[in-house]
Image: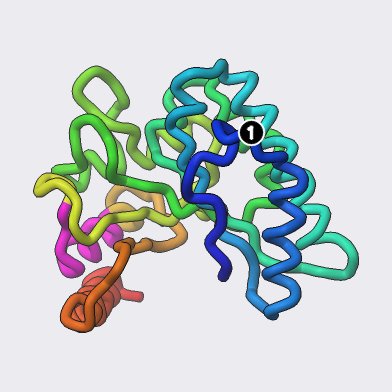
Amino acid sequence: MLTRIAAKPASDGLDPVKLAQEAAKIAIDNNFDGVDVDWEDFVYWGSHSDDDTFNWLDKFQTELAAQLKGNGNDMIISHAPVAWWFTKEKAAWVQFNKKHAETIDFYNMQFYNGKHGYNTCEDNFTSKFGDDKDPSVAHLIEMGVSADKIVMGKQFDQQPQDLWSGDDLGKCVKRGADEFKTPIAGVMWWKTNITQAEFEVSTKWVSDFKTAAGY
């Protein structure tokens, strides 16, 4: 998978259609499975309306899907938004999902970078969004995101309250499926500039997670 656009493309005035074409060309020319769109333009999101944000994302996704899922291609498209961009019915990302869900294979949903942290399994799966809680899986489903497209993202070196061992998160995901009746697509563990030692730790983390989750 090719990960694309992590900075602030909308704030920098980049053309979403051209950017999508460039990303698709790289993925196609290099035989990638698809493109994971890591749009983290917090500056644009914080200074523009939901309509403005939606319009930029809409143009980008429409062109990306035309390139990767048209012209004889059937490649993967995923997005990696933060969960708290799905807080209300009129939010840009909620509207974006309503329009483009069919051409999005899954979301690497960032269950970190929130205001309060995901301290418990209930915080991850069932907590009602509000003044003291970040969006949970249940809230995302309420906003229209299908559970089978939610990949729960965790960060390797985030705030202490957001750190989850592979064993603990695996047990939580299994509990989500068994007790809360909400099986999700999987999990994603993210870090930049990983060292060899951290890679070895991450390998064990994945193994512990799979064992605990029953994958």
Location of residue 100 in the rendering, given as x and y in whole percent from the top left corner: 69, 41
**Is residue 133 in the magenta section?**
no
Label count reads 1
**Amino acid type for the residue under numbered disc 1:** Gly
Q: Give the residue drawn at x 29%, y 75%.
A: 210
Q: Magenta segment range?
A: 163-175
Q: Is residue 211 visible?
A: no
Q: Which of 107 and 37 is in front in this view?
A: 37
Lateral position of residue 51 relative to residue 41, left or right:
right
Query: Where does the C terminus fall, quadrant-wise?
Result: bottom left
Task: Examine the image and state in which quarter residue 200 appears.
Answer: bottom left
Location of residue 18 in the rendering, given as x and y in whole percent from the top left corner: 76, 48
Q: At numbered mark 1, what does the secondary structure look like: helix, strand or loop?
A: loop
**Is residue 169 in the magenta section?**
yes
Q: Is residue 206 visible?
A: yes
Q: Give the residue drawn at x 29%, y 58%.
A: 173
Lateral position of residue 53 relative to residue 196, left or right:
right
Q: Give the residue drawn at x 19%, y 23%.
A: 132
Q: Nearer the viewer, residue 4 or 101?
A: 4
Colour pattern of the rendering: rainbow
Q: Give the residue drawn at x 74%, y 72%.
A: 28
Q: What residue is pinned by disc 1?
A: 13
Location of residue 169 in the rendering, given as x and y in whole percent from the top left corner: 22, 60
Q: Residue furthest right?
A: 71
Query: Where does the N terminus fall, quadrant-wise?
Result: bottom right
Asked if 192 appears above or below 209 in the picture, the reply is above
Asked if 205 appears above or below 5 in the picture, the reply is below
